[in-house]
Amino acid sequence: MPLPRLTQAQAPLTQAIEVLDEHGERRNTAIPAERPLTVFVDKRELLTLMTLGAAPELLVLGYLRNQRLLERLDDIESITVDWDVNAAAVRTVSGLPDLEARTAQKVVTTGCGQGTVFGGLMDEIDRIELPPPAEARISQRGLYALLEAMRLQESTYKSSGSVHGCALFALGRDTQGVQTAELLHFVEDVGRHNAIDTIAGWMWMQGLDSRGKVFYTTGRLTSEMVIKAAQMGVPIVVSRSGITQMGHALAGQLGMTLFGRAVNRHFLCYSGFERFDAEPAAALERRPLPGD
Amino acid sequence: MPLPRLTQAQAPLTQAIEVLDEHGERRNTAIPAERPLTVFVDKRELLTLMTLGAAPELLVLGYLRNQRLLERLDDIESITVDWDVNAAAVRTVSGLPDLEARTAQKVVTTGCGQGTVFGGLMDEIDRIELPPPAEARISQRGLYALLEAMRLQESTYKSSGSVHGCALFALGRDTQGVQTAELLHFVEDVGRHNAIDTIAGWMWMQGLDSRGKVFYTTGRLTSEMVIKAAQMGVPIVVSRSGITQMGHALAGQLGMTLFGRAVNRHFLCYSGFERFDAEPAAALERRPLPGD
């Protein structure tokens, strides 16, 4: 199957500005870039996304996928991003069925406030089946390996803050049979929804099986984060932040395992305990972790 | 002018759930509530907001105001929230002009991701005039007074995390002429856009003059946070978090003063230095502040 042709229109991720600090000193600091990207599907304007611009083509692909505006990868011929005009041109093979109707119903969701999920996503929840606990589980040492990898990951967040990071991990075993976590893909954006959509786009292009995959986000475990992880078929989600009631309720309904407040050796497992192999002793093993 | 009649449909703000921690112990923790609120304007469905539910009537009022779907307070007869059906019924005096047209154009903004601002807000920026620096300025001690008030504020965030808080402050002077900051109103929501909209609704009901007011948010200083503060006529915004490029650019365009990373005695002034009276000595004064 021929993959869609994607441009590689990366843009500068930070901008230097002058700030005044509490000591009355002026100095330079870096802030994350943020640019509008207007998405056109077969020359028809769909919407405008605000993005950091790290991987705009995968963002658009994942957005169309997670909004269920696009069902098959080979319906897409190409995605061409041009930062001179802040536009992403999506060319389809034979158009997208009833795009009009599917973008009509708006549900304004939490996120940091008023993220839009086009109608129908909630209906889908009932149809999603995540891999059973026997086939997709995580141990405490596997979780710690994941958190250590995130701690070492270089990022725009570390240099300028104010962005959300998302990562996809594959669980494995080392020669001693201890669970490992391999970082497959890491992306940041000014919005965490953009970040997860970009990961979804990447997974789709890779044709990855979601079994044994774990999704990490710096953002909160809100309803639409859980929905998007479920759409990607990922049964385990780890967050540095907390959770909201809808996120918790949906995860319970889906049998998804959620970890929050996960930093260094600390975490809370909020749901899906049956996928989690607790190894409390590991919480006490001394490893040199800053902030520990 | 008769004010709109608002119900007081407050709902429980937290829910207790069982979690499993890194020591393998099960315990109870509180998470923030999150519930859909479908907004009907004269029985016509507009959209569904996900909210904590602390002040749903003011949220709906502020949302309609900030989206510029509503121009005059006395166009509204009543807002009735009923949590049994998760609905907010807005009754207008004579309908809202071209509601259809104004909700057509979507711009998906940053926020934590894909918040929607209906079209036309950006066009408004040029027309907004904030009070000049001479009439609206903040001193370093005034800023510290504000941060101290936020530190002492009881909140759902402190009990369960995962919510955003917003507050409106009035600057004043004590008998020694030192600037003070009075907390006028504080609100939290699962989304920071909801929180700022609720503050806007409250300001509108109070008929408050925005001169000498300061807006505090736990969220990032993104483009739409700056736009919404500007729509409220508030010239100074303080955030515990950082800033994005569009937020910075818009604040420059508006002559808005932005402070970020503001905790205890630390802060960065990102823009509008001309409204800020630096008092570096205050940064070194010892006061008992945790984390200081």
Image (spheres, coloured by chain):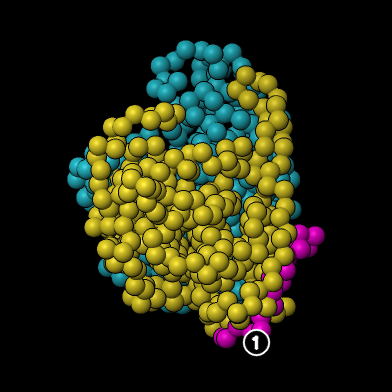
Chain colours: A cyan, B yellow
**Residue found 45% across the figure and 54% down from its top:** B169
* Residue A98 visible in the snapshot: no
**Residue at the image point whose x is 45% and y is 67% from the top:** B209
What span is colored magenta in the figure?
B78-98
Q: Is residue B88 magenta?
A: yes
Would you identify the image quadrant in which residue A121 lies? bottom right
Q: Which residue is mark 1?
A: B94
Residue at horizontal 80%, vertical 60%? B84
Percent coordinates x, y for residue A16 in the rendering:
23, 50
**Vertical arrangement, residue A113 with respect to residue B5, above or below:** above
Residue B219 versus residue A78 in the image, above or below:
above
Image height of A131 relative to A290, above or below? below
What is the x, y in percent for residue B146?
42, 46
- Residue B15 colored in magenta in the image: no
The quarter of the picture where residue A151 lies is: top left
On the image, the x and y values in percent for residue A39 come to 43, 68
Q: Position of residue A248 (x, y in %)?
A: 67, 43
Disc 1 marks which amino acid?
A: Ser
Q: Residues within 10 Å of mark 1 (few under 14, many from 20)?
A: few
Identify the subunit bearing mark 1. B
- Residue at image point 48% right, 25% down: A264
